Every structure is written in structure tokens, then in C-alpha cells.
Amino acid sequence: MKAIVFTEYGSPDRLQIKEVAKPTPKGDEVLVKVHASSINSWDWEFQSGTSFINRLLFGLFKPKPEKQILGADIAGTVEEIGKNVTRFQLGDDVFGDLWDSWGGFAEYACAPERSLELKPVNSTFLEAAAVPQAGVLALQGLRKTGQIQPGQKVLINGAGGGVGTFAVQLAKLNGTEVTGVDKSHKLEVVRSVGADHVIDYTKEDFTQNGQRYDLILDVQGVRSMFDYKRALSLHGTYAMVGGDIPRMLQALFFGLWGSITGGQKFRFVAEGPNKGLADLKELIESGKVVPVVDKRYKLSEVPEAFRYFTEGLHAGKIVVDIES
């Protein structure tokens, strides 16, 4: 089968399309004929070697042999099932996040059955592939507050990306007043998915304008926790999706302090893959949530797709059409 393989950390130029062995499912796995995948920040961090944590997990100096095919999100058709699989049958259309095993940038991938759900019936494979990691992170981030109340003020920092476009839609379903922050060229997309207000961060600092928010979902993770603290309401919650280690440590400190004082809360979004994916499937099938796809690339064009991703120009998700 064809797959995008990388044996060295660095630029997208090191990604190569190669013929590799077709995987065989274990007892609790299914073999999926992959129709589409998508690019997430985690793919780029792993491929570029910028995350020390990823290197510790997947190979300090070069990716481990079993981790040399990127791609967490997949949508495809079940072609073979392991002997212990009970949730799926041959021919089922599925989607999910292969957080544990990767391998989505290939014609076939094996996945534990717990990592998958039936594909939304009203979604194409390309649309479905845009959902698992970004949609679940958005859902988990909003759930960090407990129960969001109608009328609460929510700010999404990085609202024009994959996680952000899902987060805006999900927050609006709860009747909140949503402010989306991103670059100017993404703001029209942010408005189109339901944001009540938009802020171009190159022109306005949302932590300095006097507004206070009940929830800040931060997809960027590039600012000090002191800045976010200033923009939170007295008992507001900050939820971090990604970010570097110094800011994670800051969030941990503020989170511990908040638990002691009963004031503002600082949380990490780290519940694990696919927790809430079934809920997202229902919302998509009911038309309440719509995946936003920016560009589509062929499997052979994955290096180009990564370069586009690193430019930060995409609004919504970048998807990979495995079969084109």
C-alpha cells in the first residue's frame, strides 16, 4: 500500500510517499481502508520534532519504526475485523482519532475498535476526517466549565482553526455569547460559524480591552497566564488546548491556586482521544455542527499540505483525500 513515511525530524520535505506493507489487525482492531485524513497541530509537532515530549514518546533522535506514518484522524471503510471486535462489521463506514497508533496518511490503517465511531450519514469522508481530534478537543474544552449556562460570555482564542471553528459552533448551541479571536483573514469564517463578536489579534489585545469572560478556550497557548487571568471573570475558567511546557506549568500553578481560593479555574484539555466523538456524530447528523474544510490535498501532496499548515493561513481543517 502507499503511505507517507518520515524517518527524520525536520521540514516537510523529508516526508516521502512509499510502498509499505499493509497492516494486519490484532484481536481488538479493525483494518480500515482509509478514504480521507486530516492534519492536526500534533502531526506537525511530531513531524518537525519541535516537541520534546513527542520525542520522548516516539523517538528521541528519529521516529520509531512503528511511528513513521503520520495522520491521527481517519475516515474510511472497515475491510477486516479482529476476532474480538464486536462493535463493527465489514463494510461499515467509520471515523476516529488514532491518537495511540497514528498511520492515517496511508491507504490502510489498523485501529482499536474503541478509537472509532460510525461515520455521520450526512458527511462525506473528507468532512468526517476533519472532525475527530479537533472536534473532540473543542467539546472537551467547553465541558471543562461543567455546565455552560445560556448568556455566559465565551472567548475562543484561535477561533478560525480546526478546533476553533468547532468550539464556536458548540458554544453557540449552549446559548452563550461567543467572541472569536484570530487573524483578520479568518474572521469571516469565524462569523459564518456563529460568533457574535470577532477580534483581530493583530489590532486589538483582548486581555487589555476591559472585557471579562466566563470561559476562555485557548487554542494558541502563546500568552502568559497573567494575561488570561486579567480577561477572566471572577469565577471564570481558562481551558488550554496545547501549548509549550512553560505555559503548561503556569496553568498548573494557577489551577492549583484557584482550587485553594475558590476563584478562577485553569484547566488542561487532556481527556484522551474520541471521548465525545459519538456526541459530535449526533450533532453533525442533526445539522447543528458542520465541519469547516479549508483545502483538500492528495496523499502525494501531504508535504505541500504541511507547508500550507505551517503558514497558518488555513481557516478550518486541511484534509487529505487518500484516494484521489
Image (spheres, rainbow, N blue to C red):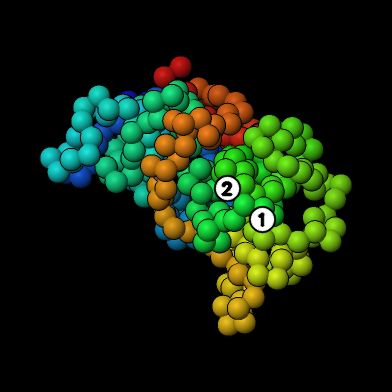
Secondary element at image label 1: loop
- The first of marks 1 and 2 along the sequence is 1
Q: Is residue 305 left or right of residue 182?
A: left
Q: Residue at 66% x, 55% y: name it.
A: 152
Instruction: Name the residue type under label 1.
Output: Gln
Say if residue 250 shows up in the picture: no
Numbered mark located on residue 174 in the image:
2
Instruction: Name the residue type under label 2.
Output: Asn
Q: Is residue 279 left or right of residue 247?
A: left
Residue 316 lies, in percent from the top left, at 61, 35
Say if residue 260 shows up in the picture: yes
Q: What's the distance in space between the residues labelled 1 and 2, CA to CA?
A: 9 Å
Secondary element at image label 2: loop
Is the residue under label 2 in contact with that under label 1 (CB below 8 Å)?
A: yes
Numbered mark located on residue 286 in the image:
none
State which quadrant residue 7 falls in. Answer: top left
Question: For this rendering, which residue is in front, 65 or 200?
Answer: 200
Residue 166 lies, in percent from the top left, at 57, 41
Task: Determine crowd level at label 2: few under 14, some 14-19, many 20+ residues with C-alpha closer than 10 A.
Answer: some
* Furthest residue toward front: 150
Residue 225 lies, in percent from the top left, at 69, 67
Question: For this rendering, which residue is in front, 307 or 96?
Answer: 96
Numbered mark located on residue 152 in the image:
1
Q: Is residue 98 left or right of residue 138?
A: left
**Residue 162, relative to residue 213: is it above or below?**
above
